[in-house]
Image: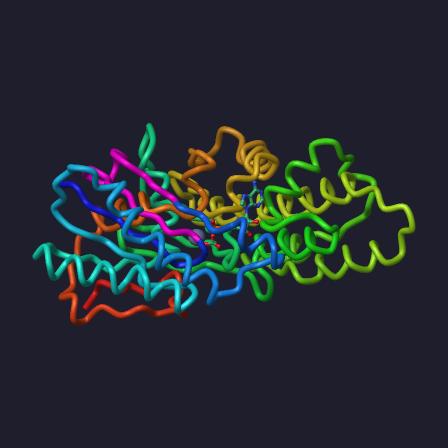
Amino acid sequence: MKILGIETSCDETAAAVVENGTKVLTNVVASSVSLHQKTGGIIPEVAAREQLKFILPVIEKALGKKKIDALAVTVGPGLIGSLLVGVETAKTLAYVWKKPLIPVNHLQAHLYANWLEGKKPLFPAIGLVISGGHTDLVLLKNHGKIKWLGGTRDDAAGECFDKTARVLGLPYPGGPAIAKLAIKGNPQTYDLPRPMMNQENLDFSFSGLKTAVINLIKKEKRMKKADMAAGIQLAIAAVVAEKTLRAAEKHRVKSVLLAGGVAANQALRQQIATQMGKNFNLFVPSPLLCTDNAAYIASRAFFNYQPVAWQKIAADPGLSIETDVDAS
Ligand code: KG4
Ligand code: ZN
C-alpha cells in the first residue's frame, strides 16, 4: 500500500510517498527557514503564507507518476494557519481523487521515523520526542497504544536550544547553530545546571537552564561562545539521557526510540547511546528523518490505518501526544 503523507505543522511544507509504512519512495521538504532567520524566529502568518505557495508543487514533486492508495495529513499539534494549509489541501485531494484520508497526530508520527530504516523496533518501547515545541517521554505498548510518562514543565529542549542560541547571537534555528559551535568548545568551562536530573519523575524543565545561561552571559565580559554552546548542549543531553534510561529501566522495554528535531543532535545521540550501553535496543533515525518531514506521517498512517471521512477532519493546534485523532 502506498500512502501520500502531508505535513505542514510548523514552518516546513512536506510531502512523501511511503510504501507499506517502511519504504520511503519520495520525501520532499520545502523550508522557509531563510525567511525566519531574518526575524530570528517563526512568525506564524509568514510561515503559513509561504506554505500556501509551496504545498501543491511539493505534493506534485513527491507524487511524480506514482499511484497512491490513501492520503495522510498532520492535523495537530502545530500552528493553526500552517496546519490549515495541509489539512484543507489533503481534504480537497481526498475528495477529488476519492481516496481514504487518515488524520495524523504529529507527535506520535515523529516516532515512526524509526520504522523507515533498517531494523524495526519491538514493543513495548520507550519513545522520546524532543522537538522545537515538545519534550515528551511515552510508553508504546503497541501501534496506537501510547501512554504519556512525563514531559517538560516549561520550555521544550528545542526551545531551550533556540532561545539560548539567540542570546548568544547565533542564527535561527538555534539547535544546529549551537551544535556546530560546540564542536570547538569545552563543555566544562561553565557550570550549568541539569534541571530535575536527580528527581525520580520523568519530567523535564529547561527554562532554568535558559535563565542560567542568560545570567552568565550578562556577568562574563569575555564570553567563550563555543564553550558556552558545548555546555548548553551537554546539559540538555545529560538530563535527557538520564530520564530516558530511567524510563526504559522502569518499564523494562525492548526498544528505545528517539525522535524529533533535537534528536538530530550528534552529542545527544552519543550521550544516550553511551548511557544505554548494550542493555537496550536504541533506535535513532537519520538526522533528516528527525526534523519535520512527511515520510513519518505516512508511516504512522499505515501502521494505524483508520481513515476518517474528510468532512469530519479538522486541524487541532493543541493536540497532546496521547490523543488518538483517528479513533472516532
Ligand atoms: O521536530 P522539529 O523539526 O520541529 C518541531 O516539530 O518542532 O524540531 C525543530 C527543533 C528546533 O528547536 C531546532 O533548533 C532543533 O529541533 N534542532 C536541533 C538540531 N537540529 C534541529 N537541536 C539540536 N541539535 C541539532 N542538530
Ligand atoms: Zn516536529
Q: Residue at x 50, y 60 (%)?
A: 150
Give the main secondary structure, helix, strand or loop, of the magenta stretch. strand
Question: Magenta residues?
Answer: 12-29
Q: Name the residue nearer the viewer: 29 or 24.
A: 29
Please, is residue 106 above or below residue 79 in the view? above
Horizontal and vertical percent position of residue 82: 39, 63
Q: Residue at x 29, y 47 (%)?
A: 57
Q: How is the image coloured?
A: rainbow
Q: Residue furthest right?
A: 221
Horizontal and vertical percent position of residue 181: 70, 37
User: Which quadrant would the N terminus be assigned to in this image?
Assistant: top left
User: Which quadrant would the C terminus be assigned to in this image?
Assistant: bottom left
322 sits left or right of 56 in the view: right
Please, is residue 105 above or below residue 293 in the view? below
Please, is residue 208 above or below residue 301 in the view? below
Horizontal and vertical percent position of residue 124: 34, 45
Horizontal and vertical percent position of residue 326: 22, 63
Please, is residue 243 above or below residue 187 in the view? below
319 sits left or right of 101 in the view: right
Quarter assignment of residue 190: top right
Q: Name the residue nearer the viewer: 97 or 77.
A: 97
Q: Name the residue nearer the viewer: 53 or 15.
A: 53
Q: Residue at x 16, y 71 (%)?
A: 311
Asked if the magenta segment contains residue 243, the reply would be no
Q: Name the residue nearer the viewer: 194 or 199.
A: 194
Quarter assignment of residue 152: bottom right
Q: Residue furthest front?
A: 53
Asked if the magenta segment contains residue 22, the reply would be yes
Q: Residue at x 76, y 39 (%)?
A: 226
